[in-house]
Image: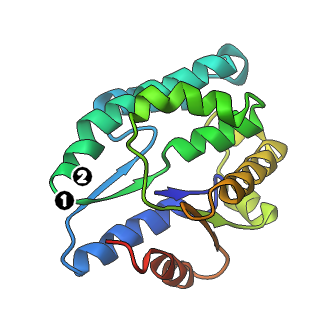
Amino acid sequence: MLEGVDGSGKSTQARLLAEALRTRGIEVCETREPGGTQLGEAVRALVLATTQDTLSDAAEVYLFAAARAQHVAERIRPALRQGEWVVCDRFVDSSLAYQGVARGIGIDVVASANALAVDDCVPDLVIVIEVPDAMSARRRRGGDRIEAAGNDFQVAVAKGYRELVARAPGRCRMINGEGTPDEVHARVMDAIAGLG
């Protein structure tokens, strides 16, 4: 799973990772959250298009969890049963960082809300791409509700990711997202060495 603040380059890196794995002859399920299923894409459109003041923080948590439950049932578990690698642009750690830390709900509360959704389907490795705050701010388009929450919100999200890496250093790895996409991709490939 690839994680990071908006503008970190994680979507580009998820695509590059999936391509690299396929060139090695590995079957890959490439997906994203929220999204990946019809329900997930509908939730994505709803949550990202809603104005800041019309969606409660709790509703945001449960909408993402609902989309994730469908994603796990419809895409992720079937892919794993087929022996595929799953490369996902965001997963539960996004909710922990965005809603748990940045929205102030609490990591443990958000983790509990997602426990049924993920049903013990946890990634072998979470790669968090870290970039300086100014870099992510330059890259953000501000076009959706979460990006429009502002720089202070994204700074809090980055703090959340650092806390998650500190809590689970074996499962979560932070990599430097500065440099060209190819340079960052090389770091991602180093991070996955030994998996599989």
CA–CA distance between discs 1 and 2?
Answer: 5 Å
Disc 1 crowd rating (10 Å Cα; few below 14, some 14-19, many 20+) is few
Query: In the rendered view, would you say 40 is above or below 158?
Result: above
Residue at 35% across / 50% down in the picture?
31
* Marking on residue 80: 2
Tag 2 secondary structure: helix
Q: Position of residue 161 (x, y in %)?
A: 69, 53
Residue at 34% across / 36% down in the picture?
71
Q: What type is the residue that disc 1 sits on?
A: Gly
How is this picture coloured?
rainbow
Q: Indicate the quadrant containing the C terminus: top left, top right, bottom left or bottom right.
A: bottom left
**In the shown orientation, is residue 86 left or right of residue 164?**
left
Disc 2 crowd rating (10 Å Cα; few below 14, some 14-19, many 20+) is some
Q: Which residue is mark 1?
A: 83
Q: Position of residue 93 (x, y in %)?
A: 57, 46
Q: Are marks 1 and 2 in contact (CB under 8 Å)?
A: yes
Tag 1 secondary structure: loop
